[in-house]
Amino acid sequence: MFLFDLHCDTVGRLHDSICFKPGESVFLTKGERLPETDTLLHNHGHLALDRMAGIDWCQCFAIFMPDQYRGPDAIAYFESCYRYFQTQLAQNAGRLAQVQTVGQLKSALSEGKAAAMLTVEGGSALGGDLSRVGRLAECGVRIVTLTWNGENELASGNATTHGFSGFGREAVAEFERAGIVADVSHLNDRGFEELAGFARRPFIATHSDARSVHNHPRNLTDDQFRHIVSIGGLVGLNFCVHFLSDDPDPAFPRLAAHLERFLRLGGEDVVALGSDFDGCDVPSWLGSGEKFPDLYREVCGGFGQGIADKLFFTNAADFFARWEGGM
Ligand SMILES: [Zn+2]
């Protein structure tokens, strides 16, 4: 089994547990505080390097931007999380390597290391300054989720109804030029429609499920999913219990229903994984990263190994290979 997970909040959760005093952290909306002694190697959250040992794994680690940070505060928060990420990489150099390309990813895996791809959740990381796109690219950021649930300088999330600002349209064009993939998870329907009209390169949804299976604004409509199929994008299945169903602890069939829907909509080469680990409540049987092999076995049993391999790794790796080729 090879694994490529498009979204987790582990770095931000660890960063905030260490860098923010109780009561100050805005990250508590995305998971309980972890002990200050926790690290990327060993922690009490959903994803820890020691517990993932033996899994051939590429993880997108998001720097999550709380909606309330603007301008210099947003930039300072991004830089603080980035420093923390670099510190963890340095401390785990034998186990984990930051990668920006599919070639680097495959090299890391062949050396027995996990591959870490840096992403940003929330375009507010630009601090309202287009020149910051270059800084994000320099840090190795490969994906930017354009909004979180609320509004930022670029556009507006699913808790609101506004569309893109002029700055947001310019920012997407700059991301495309810099080779950074735009991510529509969290964007509202109006924003999705506008982006579909002006984007010049394919965009993706890193961690969203099917709204026709469970009606939640964080999930994609059938038409939105079909659009992502038509542009050769990517959609990561989210493990968040609230996006899967009304069941507080959904079993595999609830998750399988979303995969089945996406496959029926022509998504065999588009479906991927976007666990949202350390950013949401997940089913107990899928409660942390070392359970990925259990999910793989379930998907193999229900859909066949060909689909399981595409879902778990190949579709995401192929997307980035196409993207690097100028798709
Ligand atoms: Zn998210």
Image (spheres, helix red, strand yellow):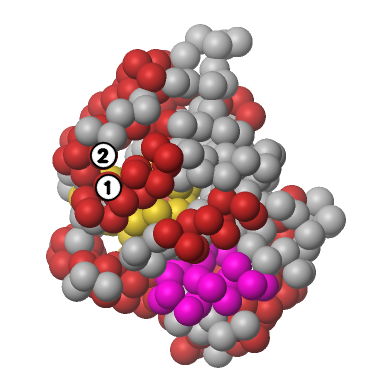
Q: Residue at x 16, y 67 (%)?
A: 103
Give the CA separation, mark 2 to mark 1. Answer: 7 Å
Q: Is mark 1 within 8 Å of ligand 1?
A: no
- Which residue range is magenta in the image? 222-239
Tell me the tag on residue 133.
2
Q: Residue at x 57, y 33 (%)?
A: 151
Q: Quadrant of residue 227?
A: bottom right
Hey, what amino acid is under mark 1? Answer: Glu
Q: Is residue 301 visible?
A: no
Q: Nearer the viewer, residue 19 or 35?
A: 19
Label 1: which residue?
174
The secondary element bearing badge 2 is classed as helix
Does 233 lie within the magenta span? yes
Q: Is residue 153 visible?
A: yes
175 sits to left or right of 235:
left
From the viewer's perspective, is the residue at label 2 or at label 1 nearer?
1
Q: Quadrant of the N terminus?
A: bottom left
Q: Are marks 2 and 1 in contact (CB under 8 Å)?
A: yes
Q: Quadrant of residue 202?
A: bottom left
Say which label, 2 or 1, has the lower sequence index.
2
